[in-house]
Amino acid sequence: MAMNAPRGTQDILPGTSEKWQYIEEVLRDLSRRFHYKEIRTPIFEHTELFQRGVGDSTDIVQKEMYTFEDRGGRSITLRPEGTASVVRSFVQNKLHGLANQPTKLFYFGPMFRYERPQQGRYRQFVQFGIEALGSEDPAVDAEVLSFALKSYQDLGLKSLKLVLNSLGDQESREAHRQALVDHFSPHKEELCEDCQLRLEQNPLRILDCKKDKDHPAMGTAPSILEYLNEYSKTYFDKVKHYLDAMDIDYVIDPNLVRGLDYYNHTAFEIMSEAEGFGAITTLSGGGRYNGLVEDIGGPATPGIGFALSIERLLMALEAEGVELPVENQLDCYVVVMGEKAEVEAVKLVDKLRSEGLQVDKDYLHKKVKAQFKAADRLKAKKVIVLGDREIEEGIGNVKDMASGEQKEISLEDISAELKDTKGE
């Protein structure tokens, strides 16, 4: 019986993995420019972290988590998202006590959700995300929004739309919650089972329902923007003012709620408007989560962040026809003729690699013609031919694969020659 990867997972093979590496390098550089430092958290956590952090009423907790009991009888969950883990680490390691605040962190890593696999959505997927903890300044919200957009723009994407909303503070949310209960209660029996439960637990989740999205009551549901108190209105106005100052375009969507319970105040999504991208246009999302640190056992600490899926980012690049400038050329390929030259070839390859060059050779004892074909397939810039004569004379026959020019160079000088031509 053939063994295949589990449904909803994928192998990232050579030829594609280089694109992932390039994307990671771009995002790491962006993090450096925005002064975010990397954090690495465990792939699995105690289940209670996500129940308390993400929210019991969310689809993620109710339907999508990979949860199991370990040998000690503890309930463990493969992380479905990154924020709860980062906040847990922030609290556990007392990062709130650092002199420089806010604490600005970024992460890469696999996440796990048991959902129906489809194009660009997997049960194991990789997220890049940032979190800024310790400041309630609307300018930090604007910084995170700018970072999120630049994550795509720096990779060449142009067909982007930033969708923005405010979920308000606790007082505003309570007023809106009651308005939603009053609005949807007469239609309770017409809603799906999940939304009937949400009406009691968290009616805001109804606005995010995929099954009932076309129900007439959805179009007339009260907007959170109608229930923002003065503080929440002022906060949202400042966020928009900063975005305007940075010439960042955005669209206000009062029904944008996001899929996690911890959001308040600023909430946003970035969508692809590229033709042929697919029915689900959301690329990434995030928002402010004041109160989450306290929920996980830490001191009162405001926070905001966002996360993007690398898989969906790659889909967007393909939809817009963006070719990443991935380097896939060898600096040099060594062609060997004869047993005596084999030992010298191994020595030379190792020496060149030690000096920072990307070098390979034949390990299948192919004939010379086949070795040249292999060098061509590997896009080698140079080929060094080593035979018995070359070894006796202490030289290598160096061929430029682009021009066809050949010259004999002392084995001692080959490294300098390759480095010179590499820098041209």
Image (cartoon, helix red, strand yellow):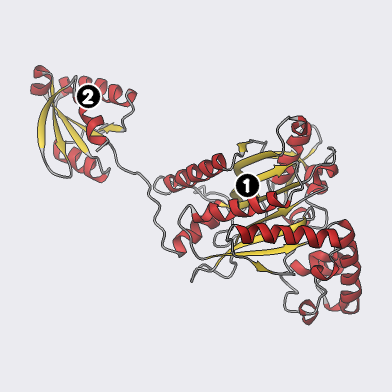
Looking at the image, residue 2 lies above or below residue 298: below
Seen at 12% across and 18% down, the residue is 394
Q: Please say if 130 is above or below 149.
A: above
Looking at the rendering, which quadrant does residue 366 occupy?
top left
Which x, y percent locates residue 337? 14, 28
Q: Residue furthest bottom?
A: 216
Q: Nearer the viewer, residue 321 or 246?
A: 246
Residue to which mark 2 is pinned: 345
Residue 206 is tagged as: none
Q: Quadrant of residue 219?
A: bottom right
Hey, which quadrant is residue 37 in on the image?
Answer: top right
The residue indicated by pointer 1 is 129
Which residue, as the protein is rendered here, is positioned at the far front?
245
Q: Position of residue 74 (x, y in %)?
A: 80, 36
Q: Nearer the viewer, residue 398 or 13?
A: 398
What kind of element bears circle 1?
strand
Q: Is residue 349 left or right of residue 319?
A: left
> Horizontal placement of 105 versus 386: left or right?
right
